[in-house]
Image (spheres, helix red, strand yellow):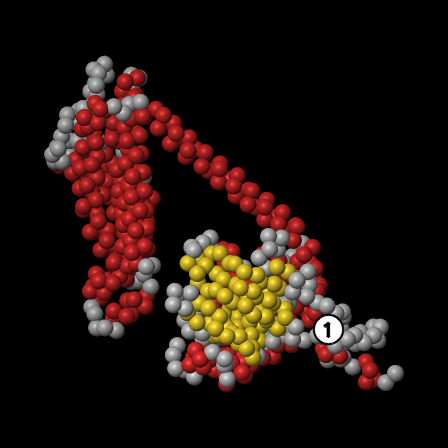
Amino acid sequence: MTTDSVTTPAIEDDVNLTTGEVFPERPTGHPVMQLTDVAVAFAGRTAVRDVTFDVHDREITALIGPSGSGKTTLLRALNRMHDTVRSARVTGTIMLGDTDVYATSTDPTLLRSRVGMVFQRPNPFPTMSIYENAVAGLRFNGVRKKALLDEAAESSLVAAALWDSVKDRLKAHASTLSGGEQQRLCIARALAVEPEVLLMDEPTSALDPIATKRIEELIGELKNRVTIIIVTHNMQQAMRVSDRCAFLLMGEDKAGELIEFDATAKLFSEPDDARTLDYVNGRFG
Amino acid sequence: MSVLTFDPSGDPILERRRQIQSIAQASLGRRKAYSAVALGICWVFLVLAIIPLVAVIVYTFAKGIVAWNATFFTQVTKPEGIPDGGVANALVGTVIIGAVATAVTIPLGLLGGLFLAESDGRVASGIRFTADLMTGVPSILMGIFGYIALVKAFGYSGLIGAFAIGMIMLPIIMRACETAIRGVPGHLNEAGLALGARRFMIARRVILPAALPGIITGVLLAIARGVGETAPLLFTIFGNQYMQWNPTKPMDALPLVIYNNSSQPYPDLLQIAWGAALLLMAMVLVLSIGSRIVAARLQRERR
């Protein structure tokens, strides 16, 4: 046996080091989330409707569209955040793998540990240290083993490109970090639970251009780890980071609708719908 | 449950995801039970806290409603043994004293609250501290102060009662106004400043209208508190068996009727006391519900 065979294989290798077994290549691009005729209404008034598309594994899906087109409303439907709003009704079908997100047998807390979320404004827990913030989701989900907590904290902080700057002050308060660092801590906090899908709601809208650039680079790097759905009303951002794109638009009755869903390159160069073309060329919105 | 259709071994991320998901799944029952127990404890304590409140309301209602008849509202208080007594003189006294106290404390409290909200100086923090102290002072001190400072010089009168009640209401209104005004987003203030407006103009045209729901709620709750006070009236308005519309003369008030009659052994006087208690409670209830309705309506109009 040569030394080569014991070097750590890349994720794609799919070799079990203990047994030497080689597994079929990890499938990519298959749908992890499937939305069928999804609609959200508040107090009987439809906010977004007719949304049908697949979210593919380890891709970045962007939701774009002008204000009021229901991007954020749709995003929050995916991890049942609307459960907390009494008047909200979500109809249609959302499947996460073979789990029906809105089935009565689906526990919303368990679901949300599989579908993480990062919000517009950085919202680290103010009374917790950097380390405690990073592992907060794990603790909430019943993880108590110190080894697993430490491993997850390091891994997620590394993935969020924060480890090098905070590894010597993990006990410091999260409020000592800058806005961009706080947002990366929030990404680490979401990643530590190892969700299958990460929802990002305009994660850079409260950040300056340099912090925005770092978050965008980070989003690209996270692709191998987690499937990302990102809401943005910055079209350049959608173009830069996403693989596929859903374009939503407010209809005549003020309800958002899905106009077009396609590979980002196609949607931005030769979309099928004239309204998409107008929007991506900056003719409105 | 999982979307994984292949063996995750060797992939640290997938391995950890599987581990975390299985812990989350396994601990779900324990976490749910914990949550249910905590919620159950909340309910138990909620019920325990509500029992005395409900008991007081139900008991007062049952005892007081029998006293409510036509003469109760139209006749003045009568001595024991004389039929068809009422509380009309006390009702008039309470309304007039409450109205005078409210009319004087609203402008003071509003402007004081505005000052507290807009200023962070030493004077403001001193006033704020004093106001907080005054809300904690036993209300009988207001009555004694009114007696020593005013009654000795001018004699008993409804106005001095209103003064003592106002002393109770003022700090409440002031702090409520301050909180409501502070709740108005600071960028509205900046938007006004950037248009070249003077501070008082911004306060009058932008800040106060925006804070109005909170101000109204605070004022009505202060009135509700004020009209229910007995101690400040004991040494200031003396009480009056006759109908008295002139607030410069000794007056009667509902809390005073309750206080005086409840220590009497005569059933007819006790019944009047229960009726007066129910009436006072109803007035406070109407003020509280009214404040909520007004606040909710103002909020709705904004949207």
Tell me the quarter of the image containing the N terminus of chain A: bottom right
Question: Is B209 situated left or right of A277 in this image?
Answer: left
Quadrant hosting residue A7: bottom right
Residue lying at the far top in this picture: please name it. Answer: B81
Residue B131 appears in the rendering: no
Amino acid marked by disc 1: Asp
- Residue, x 28% and y 36% (percent of image)? B283
Front residue (pair B264, A235): A235
Vertical order, A260 against B281 (above or below): below
Q: Is residue B152 left or right of residue B43?
A: left
Residue A177's spot in the image, x, y percent? 51, 72
Q: In terms of secondary structure, where does tag 1 sit? A: loop
Q: Which residue lies at the image location 75% right of the left edge and 79% below the top edge? A: A13
What residue do we see at 64% from left, 60% from top? A99
Q: Which residue is mark 1?
A: B11
**Residue A69 at x, y percent in the picture:** 43, 69
Which quarter of the figure has residue A60?
bottom right
- Name the spot of residue B239 as percent of width and height, x first: 19, 28
